[in-house]
Amino acid sequence: MKRRAAMFPGATLQEIAAMNDNRLIRPARADDLKGILAFQRAAIAAINPRTYSAEARDAWARLPAAGMQELVASGRYLVAEIGARLAGGAGWEPLDEPDQAAAVRAVFVHPDLHGRGLGARLVGAVEALIAAAGRRRILVPAALNTVSFYQRLGYVANEMAVAALDGADLRYRRMWKTAA
Ligand SMILES: CC(C)(COP(=O)(O)OP(=O)(O)OC[C@H]1O[C@@H](n2cnc3c(N)ncnc32)[C@H](O)[C@@H]1OP(=O)(O)O)[C@@H](O)C(=O)NCCC(=O)NCCS
């Protein structure tokens, strides 16, 4: 019997696993915002409470949608669409640094689809956009639950930092990679 991901009835897990190209990844549109916030909030809610407390996860999930709206409007946010639902997304922004660095932003995959290569493909697609924009150094402000994921993708862990959110401080690790 074919197993189906609970939130993605249009796609069997086998179909998702078999998607070995980037056809499902496209630039986000303004009308994707609701779907983007849905997979982001689901991904944050699924983070182990030993890594981030309920207060920290709630503060993170409450971040104003305006930031995402701006990122989408800039054309620098990609989404993965599976069976007419948004399954994940990732974006980037240029950094004002002398060496023309860029930062990866808002990488999230719906927890129903974790561990099937979608996160790696989204980050790979964003890295290609960064390289095409002529930027060579890539920063990831990595949530502590994602440090191993980014290490798998070739990022090197650097210093810890803290984001002061409304209601909680969120510790993260700055990680760097040179664009291909
Ligand atoms: C981090 C996240 C985007 C990864 O997406 P994903 O689709 O599950 O990741 P992939 O399946 O592409 O994994 C790629 C590789 O990283 C590994 N990996 C993924 N998550 C990992 C984790 N938390 N710890 C260790 N390794 C991990 C996978 O095993 C895989 O390794 P492989 O190439 O040897 O098979 C996803 O787990 C997520 O949305 N997490 C919660 C939200 C979050 O914290 N976002 C970060 C905001 S900065």
Image (tube, helix red, strand yellow):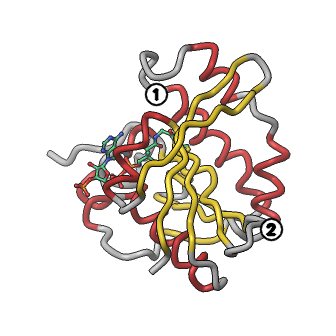
Label 1 is placed on what type of residue? Answer: Ala
In the rendered image of this protein, does residue 54 appear above or below residue 11? above
Within the image, what quadrant is residue 38 found in? top right
In the rendered image of this protein, does residue 137 appear above or below residue 160? below
Q: Which mark is residue 163?
A: none
Mark 1 residue element: loop
Residue placed at 82% from the left, 64% from the top?
73
- Residue with the mark numbered 1: 46
Using residue 10 as the reference point, say whether residue 97 is left or right of it. Answer: right
Within the image, what quadrant is residue 72 found in? bottom right
- Could you tell me residue 57's position as x and y percent? 60, 23
- Could you tell me residue 2's position as x and y percent? 20, 48
Characterize the local packing of mark 2: few (<14), some (14-19) or many (20 or more) Cα atoms within 10 angstroms: some
Q: Earlier in the sequence, mark 2 or mark 1?
A: 1
Label 2 is placed on what type of residue? Answer: Ser
- Could you tell me residue 145's position as x and y percent? 43, 34
| Disc 1 residue lies near ligand 1 with CB under 8 A | yes
Residue placed at 83% from the left, 57% from the top?
70
Residue placed at 36% from the left, 76% from the top?
21
Spatial CA distance of label 2 from label 1 is 28 Å
Q: How many marks?
A: 2
Within the image, what quadrant is residue 75 found in? bottom right
- Residue with the mark numbered 2: 74
Q: Are marks 2 and 1 in contact (CB under 8 Å)?
A: no
